[in-house]
Image (cartoon, rainbow, N blue to C red):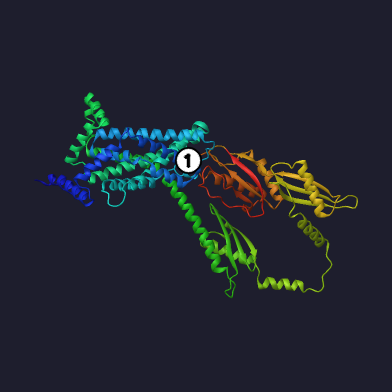
């Protein structure tokens, strides 16, 4: 016997040895082959009920954004059986089993998707949730996970039961199949009832994830069945006898017998040919998956950069600025907000401190940060919000003020400040209707007329006459001036709407008038902040919210000198929960809302 004849013998011996090591003897191989073959049936009513119930539970879990409900659907999903049948058919070259597995999977997918579409039509709400969005952008990692899962599931199915139920790995693998199928149903239902473009894009994403998991699991189970030599001569003979007595298998065999050219398909080609087909399918999936993987890498890199910036900002402050010269604590950081665009950095630091920081100390901190980040100090825009806490120095200054014996006569500015302080204390808890915020007020007095008070309030609608009368009476009562002339002026909290062109983040020409109006209001009322709600089409890239937000903030800063601390990107921006809001407004800030659409 030459060396070329030894290679097949060694391969067969290795496969038999591996099967014995796994506890898969000749009898177990026959049992596994027959069990998997029986799973690819169209006549099991309980199987189809499980498909329908799993699809219903998964669809509702996706709509409710409930991982627990989705896991429940994963545990009862029966799709693992026909997938293993597909892998076994490819491993053994059994065309009859392959035809039955394909028919079962095709009909199972159709039933699950159709039932999901029906549920979407019946539900009154169709908002995309994070659980849905998370299954519309598969990447290369999903393919790798499915490969490992398929291999583990095939091994667990082949091994005999030894105290642990071996269907658990199969249920865990089915996790990756039923939810994506229901996402496809959600997308189709949304396309037919609401938005065709967004719906079909969601369906495409879910379909790609389903096909990725299906191909990967079938291919990895193929390799496991080959390695365990599941199709020995004895096993094949038992399977042949079973297929003769099985109605579905016998029907397919008779169909093949009618057409001679189909007889050639029964072996499904050579083993290298079947492996090549599986590898080509994997490579074909890598093309769209790698694009999503690159995007995922960019997002991870951005998060890592943000973590590095925040960590460095905190370390420099705690090392050189958080303690007094004698080593006693001076300040603690309450919040850090860092935003980097090109070479410019916007840094906002909120601290609790027992001693306020001087401009020289702030400049020194900026210089140290600039050295750390390899930037010029002018490239760092630093805002330090200091919240004083009690200290010996502050208490000593208060005692000095109390100990002052002679108090000079107040000048006009002091009298004016005292009057404004009394007005503030009188109007601070002014009772206003819901969703109405006190923005500003002005007081005019003269000898000829009674006191005139102009109240400016922020609301999305004018107050009713009854509400106006109650507010005016409350103001007169608080000030103790019954004949005061009170004027109420409304500023609409809905500042306007800007329509961007599709796939563009450049400000349209029509936005100038709206932003100029907003800039005027923000300059007139320092307590006013702007919250910007940015939406995008699902076909647009995720970073469009931030780029459009950046275009608006740049315009307001360039023309009206409105800083970033007075602008907020709404947490409800985007079609998914994958975008983190830049910052939230400080407590006590009055909000002006701007909507951005396309």
Q: Is residue 22 left or right of residue 141?
A: left
Quarter holding residue 572: top right
Q: Is residue 348 left or right of residue 450?
A: left
Q: Position of residue 248 (x, y in %)?
A: 27, 30
Q: Residue furthest left?
A: 1
Residue at the (81%, 74%) spot, across then down = 405
Quadrant of the drawing holding the N terminus: top left
Residue 305 in view in this figure: yes
Other residues around mark 1 within 10 Å, as few (<14) / some (14–19) / many (≥20): some
Q: Position of residue 233 (x, y in %)?
A: 17, 40
Q: Position of residue 133 (x, y in %)?
A: 47, 43
Quarter holding residue 274: top left
Residue at the (61%, 48%) spot, across then down = 553
Residue at the (57%, 48%) spot, across then down = 571
Q: Is residue 107 left or right of residue 400?
A: left
Q: Nearer the viewer, residue 132 or 417?
A: 132
Helix, strand or loop under label 1: helix
Q: Is residue 215 depicted above or below 333 in this figure? A: above
Q: Position of residue 321 (x, y in %)?
A: 58, 68
Quadrant of the drawing holding the C terminus: top right
Residue 374 in view in this figure: no
- Residue tagged by mark 1? 60
């Amino acid at each position: 016997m030459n060396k070329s004849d030894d290679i097949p013998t060694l391969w067969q011996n290795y496969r038999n040895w591996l099967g014995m090591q796994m506890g898969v003897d000749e009898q177990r191989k026959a049992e596994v082959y027959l069990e998997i073959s029986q799973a690819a049936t169209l006549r099991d009513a309980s199987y189809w009920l499980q498909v329908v119930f799993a699809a219903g539970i998964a669809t509702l879990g996706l709509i409710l954004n409930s991982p627990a409900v989705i896991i429940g659907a994963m545990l009862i999903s029966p799709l693992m059986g026909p997938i293993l049948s597909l892998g076994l058919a490819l491993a053994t070259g059994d065309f009859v089993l392959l035809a039955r597995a394909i028919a079962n999977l095709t009909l199972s997918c159709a039933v699950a998707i159709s039932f999901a579409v029906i549920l979407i039509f019946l539900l009154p709400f169709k908002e995309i949730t994070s659980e849905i969005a998370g299954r519309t952008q598969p990447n290369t990692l999903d393919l790798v996970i499915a490969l490992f899962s398929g291999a583990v599931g095939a091994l667990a199915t082949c091994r005999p039961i030894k105290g642990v139920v071996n269907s658990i790995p199969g249920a865990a693998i089915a996790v990756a199949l039923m939810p994506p199928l229901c996402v496809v149903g959600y997308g189709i239902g949304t396309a037919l009832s609401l938005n065709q473009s967004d719906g079909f894009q969601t369906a495409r994403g879910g379909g790609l994830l389903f096909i990725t998991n299906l191909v990967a699991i079938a291919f990895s189970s193929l390799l496991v069945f080959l390695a365990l030599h599941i199709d020995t001569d004895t096993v094949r003979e038992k399977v042949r006898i079973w297929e003769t007595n099985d109605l579905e298998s016998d029907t397919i065999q008779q169909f093949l017998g009618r057409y001679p050219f189909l007889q050639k398909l029964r072996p499904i080609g050579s083993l290298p040919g079947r492996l090549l087909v599986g590898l080509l399918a994997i490579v074909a999936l890598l093309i769209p998956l790698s694009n999503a993987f690159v995007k995922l890498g960019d997002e991870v890199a951005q998060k890592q950069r943000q973590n590095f910036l925040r960590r460095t900002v905190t370390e420099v402050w705690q090392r050189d600025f958080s303690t007094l010269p004698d080593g006693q604590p001076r300040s603690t950081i309450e919040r850090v907000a860092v935003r980097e665009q090109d070479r410019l950095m916007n840094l906002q630091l909120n601290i609790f401190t027992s001693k306020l920081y001087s401009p020289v100390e702030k400049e020194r901190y900026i210089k140290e940060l600039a050295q750390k980040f390899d930037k010029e100090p002018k490239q760092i825009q630093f805002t330090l919000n200091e919240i004083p806490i009690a200290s010996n120095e502050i208490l000593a200054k208060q005692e000095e003020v109390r100990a002052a014996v002679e108090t000079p006569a107040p000048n006009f500015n002091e009298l004016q400040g005292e009057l404004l302080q009394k007005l503030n204390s009188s109007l601070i808890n002014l009772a206003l209707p819901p969703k109405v915020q006190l923005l500003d007020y002005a007081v005019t007095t003269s000898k000829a007329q009674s006191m005139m008070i102009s109240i400016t309030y922020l609301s999305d609608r004018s107050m009713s006459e009854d509400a106006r009368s109650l507010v005016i009476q409350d103001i007169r009562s608080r000030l103790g001036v019954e004949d005061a002339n009170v004027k109420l002026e409304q500023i609409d909290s809905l500042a306007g709407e800007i329509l961007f062109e599709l796939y563009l983040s450049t400000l349209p020409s029509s936005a100038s008038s709206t932003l100029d109006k907003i800039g005027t209001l923000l300059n007139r009322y320092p307590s006013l902040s702007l919250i910007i709600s940015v939406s995008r089409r699902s076909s647009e890239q995720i970073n469009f919210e931030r780029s459009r937000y950046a275009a608006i903030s740049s315009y307001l800063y360039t023309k009206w000198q409105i800083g970033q601390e007075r602008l907020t990107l709404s947490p409800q921006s985007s079609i998914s929960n994958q975008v983190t809001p830049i910052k939230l407004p400080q407590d006590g800030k009055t909000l002006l809302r701007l909507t951005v659409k396309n």
